[in-house]
Amino acid sequence: MDTVAIKTEGEHASIVAESILTAMRRRTAADSLHLAENLFDESTGLHSEGVWHNALSGISSLRISHFEDAKRIADSLYKYSWDGTSFRRRAYSGKWNHSPDIIDTIDQPNYYLESSEHRCVQHGMALIFWSELALQNEVDGVYQEQQRVVARQFVDEYWDQALNRWITISAFQGGGTVFRPSASANKQTQGVTLDDGKEQTYYRAVDQAIGVLACLGHVKVLEQQVPQNETEIEHFTSIIQSTCAELLTSFGYGNEEHVKTYIGLNRNRNFWHDGWVLLSLSAARYCVFPDLEDHGETELRKLLERIVKRYCHLDSNRTFDGTVWHWPQSFKGDADNLRYCGDNVLLYAITRSLDWAPAIGLGKYQTGFWEFIELLTSRQDDGLASVADVYKQVRLHPNTELAALLVWP
């Protein structure tokens, strides 16, 4: 890549995002697409059959002005995944090969299997995508109407107004209890403490974070409408504020040492949950900290500094090198830890939102980040990112998250 002609950090990020999207679309086949290895279907415009990754691809496409690609993703998601209540987590499209001889060769195959489950993060990311789409002048009114339906159902199905929290599974499907099988292994969720066999509901920090980001996107759509629906704007703003208050209190992000990423489950922290929470708090800071002169920027920088200290990867001089481990250093040492692509592009998005990086400053941080991305993308001739520093295989999830979070929010 010729970096000499790149004038700004934003231009660099956009160029890399576009190259990732292009490379993913080349990982296809004429027929019988491999569930894990083929990342795109030309006939539908889909990147595999899951909602999360397609929504992220759509967001990235919009941010780099690939409007037709984004519209094709939206059309196919609405056709295959939307069931009138929410989005099915993975809907069979008939394009990818689900035969047992393929599934048996895939690590954690349950991530790739058809699933009618409704999940907050999938619906939330889809709402973010549809809101971005509805804000474009290049699309017709059908997407605005779909966005209104997706937004209404998101709140109806996942927002628990009594507790001011987002639930993991749609209300229609029971809300998400400790007896729900895990998505990765199709086994009972780990970390369960049973209380006389009751179906206890649990709550995840990442669901709250995506709920905030999704509502922020919907408010932008509402503010663009003429005339504005002030009642609905106030309603969604109130949900954003209530969710952030829960993150700062019940989930403990107001005092980083007391953070818990699950309520109702005993699970270890990881950067993916913490990162999404911090990104959402930063994106919402103007309505969460309206009375502070800097709208909470100082407090959020302190929170970022403490979180990075917990996860930071150190170079040979024992200095933060701009990348983070997935697990806290107190939980797993260097030999047992790993650096995921998704975690590290999340940190990149956070530093861009705050225009600041702890310990080494923004410039040195960005240098370290891009060196890490170069490591992950140099392992394949097509420039797609591998899953992590210790995992050399290319999969969809690191690349859709990389392409989106380089340019959004």
Image (spheres, rainbow, N blue to C red):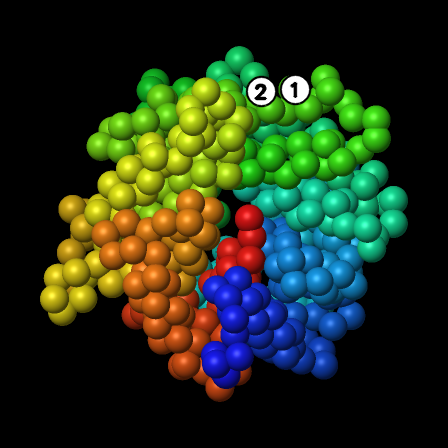
Name the residue tied to disc 1. Answer: 234
Q: Nearer the viewer, residue 34 or 299?
A: 299
- Tell which of 258 and 80 is nearer to you: 258
The count of marks equals 2
Element carrying mark 2: helix
x and y percentages locating residue 152 in the rendered image: 72, 29
Q: Position of residue 224 (x, y in %)?
A: 76, 36
Report if the CB atoms under discs 2 and 1 are less than 8 Å apart: yes
Relative to 408, say whether 250 is above or below. above
Q: Residues within 10 Å of mark 1 (few under 14, many from 20)?
A: few
Q: Image point 35% across, 22% down: which residue?
A: 249
Q: Which mark is residue 114?
A: none
Can the viewer see residue 111 in this picture?
yes
Tag 2: residue type? Ser
Q: Please determine whether, in this image, residue 320 is positioned above or below residue 201.
A: below
Residue 238, numbered circle:
2
Amino acid carrying mark 1 in the image:
Glu
In front: 81, or 208?
Answer: 208
Tell me if residue 100 can be seen. no
Quadrant housing residue 131: top right
Q: Dot 1 lies on which element?
A: helix
